[in-house]
Image (tube, grey):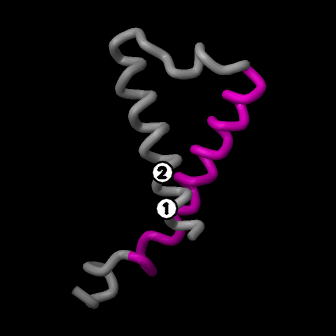
C-alpha cells in the first residue's frame, strides 16, 4: 500500500514540476500550509522509492 501511495505522490509532484515549466503552479490553488505538507510528502515518497527501489524492481531482483 505504501508503494502505491508513494507512486501517486511522485506522479503528482512530477506533473506539478512539468506544469510549472509553463508558468502554471498547482500549488497556487491550495493554502500554503497544505502545499508545504504535500511537498514534504512528495519528498518523503521520493526518498522511499530511492531506498526501496532495488528490492521492488523486478529487473534488479531477476524475477522478470
Does residue 45 appear to the left or right of 15 in the view shown? Answer: right
Q: Residue furthest left?
A: 64
- Label 2 to label 1: alpha-carbon separation: 15 Å
Q: Position of residue 43 (x, y in %)?
A: 59, 45
Q: Position of residue 39 (x, y in %)?
A: 63, 36
Quadrant occupied by the C terminus: bottom left
Of circles 2 and 1, the one toward us is 2
The dot on residue 11 is none
- Tell me what residue is drawn at x 38 percent, y 21 percent: 19
Label 2 or label 1, whichever comes before in sequence order: 2
Quadrant occupied by the N terminus: bottom right
- Tell me what residue is drawn at x 49 percent, y 17 percent: 25
- Tell me what residue is drawn at x 72 percent, y 19 percent: 31
The dot on residue 50 is 1
Q: Mark 1: few, some, or many residues within 10 Å (few <14, many ≥20)?
A: few
Does residue 54 appear to the left or right of 63 in the view shown? Answer: right
Identify the magenta region.
Answer: 32-56
Tell me: residue 28, above or below residue 60.
above
Q: Main secondary structure of the magenta part?
A: helix
Tell me: residue 54, above or below residue 63.
above
Q: Mark 2: few, some, or many residues within 10 Å (few <14, many ≥20)?
A: some
Check disc 1 and report its element: helix, strand or loop: helix
Q: Is residue 18 magenta?
A: no
In the foreground, 37 or 53: 37
Mark 2, residue position = 8
Amino acid at each position: 500500500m505504501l508503494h502505491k501511495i508513494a507512486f501517486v505522490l511522485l506522479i503528482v509532484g512530477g506533473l506539478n514540476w512539468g506544469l510549472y515549466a509553463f508558468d502554471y503552479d498547482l500549488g497556487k490553488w491550495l493554502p500554503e500550509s497544505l502545499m508545504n505538507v504535500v511537498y514534504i510528502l512528495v519528498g518523503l515518497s521520493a526518498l522511499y522509492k530511492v531506498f526501496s527501489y532495488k528490492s521492488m524492481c523486478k529487473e534488479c531482483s531477476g524475477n522478470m
